[in-house]
Image (cartoon, helix red, strand yellow):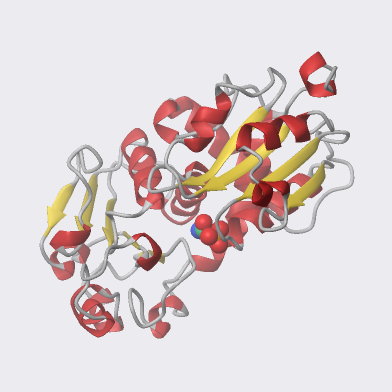
Amino acid sequence: MTTPLRHLLALDQLSRPTIEALLDHAQALRPMALVGDPAHRPLAGRSLANLFFEASTRTRCSFQLAAVRLGADVLNVDMATSSARKGESMTDTLATLEAMGVTLFSIRHSIDGVVAELANVCAPTTRLINAGDGRSHHPTQGLLDMLTIRQNKGTDFSGLKVAILGDLKHSRVARSDLHALRALGTGEIALAAPAALLPDAATAIGCRIFENADDAIRDADVIITLRLQRERMDEGLVPSLEAFYNDWGLSPQRLLLARKDAIVMHPGPMNRGVEIADEVADGPQSVIREQVSNGVAVRMAVLEALGGAPATGRRALGV
Ligand code: CP
């Protein structure tokens, strides 16, 4: 697959044809995402480093599996015990790994824009993937969410109502989903959150804002519930978890307002009983596990698209 991608930093930098090409390729890779194919090793001889300065299960593990499935070597750098703890800068950490021949990096950080800043200083052969920065972007989550919608609702999004519910203010997943949903021509995008957790106006362009969850969900084809991100939240934004669940949580009763064939999505990790009920998360309309499986296929497609040149440059060799 050929795309003009150098790095994957944010979905708003991608055209609709590029997003669709990545999704098509991820769909083609889906059969080998969970079991691998020894005959398909396009990244043999390449190395991926996972640099996660924030916690992760799904994203980091699926980047690792995706790279292994494609024949690459993987370094899961433990940032808590790395020389970052001694004060080494991110730029020096990147350059150090480049000097060992690493050309592919997936990076997660709590500060907005960090990965884009590294893209300005990395070696020419290096390819960076934003695995989540602050509240800004989580592009591979956006892609895997779109792949999951396509698998369940088809490739034409123009007739779909997609409702996104919960902590929109702090969610990088919501921002990436919104970029992708708009790019793919989604018919209606409904956002619902308490006033303190609504996104800024720029994020919500092209969306309808609802003041209660029921109106947003009514007749929806797709419902995306978001994690309440207490680690990014000032005190007092939510009066209590019980009140949040009552007003904004996806309960079995609330789900009845959506279309009968609506699918339920959540990027994970879930706060069960806060933004989503157990019966819904584990129920027949939930595609949450499909999202996780699609994460491997999407990250394979992204790694293949970026590829990464062999480490032959002077900077990469450290000479
Ligand atoms: N959805 C997501 O980013 O999950 P992790 O934090 O487990 O990677």
Above or below residue 216? Residue 275 is below
**Which quadrant is home to the N terminus?**
top right
Q: How many marks?
A: 0
Quarter of the image where one finds residue 15: top left
In the picture provided, is 151 more to the left or to the right than 181? right
Q: Foreground: 5 or 159?
A: 5
Q: Residue furthest left?
A: 211
Quarter of the image where one finds residue 58: bottom right
**Residue at 49% over, 54% down:** 148
**Can residue 28 be spotted in the picture?**
no
Above or below residue 251? Residue 139 is above
In percent of width and height, residue 197 lies at 22, 59
**Residue at 23% over, 50% down:** 199
**Residue at 38% over, 48% down:** 135
In the picture provided, is 298 more to the left or to the right than 38? left
In the picture provided, is 121 more to the left or to the right than 173? right
In percent of width and height, residue 166 lies at 28, 64
**Can residue 253 be spotted in the picture?**
yes
**Residue at 19% over, 39% down:** 206
In the picture provided, is 282 more to the left or to the right than 246? right
Above or below residue 60? Residue 248 is below
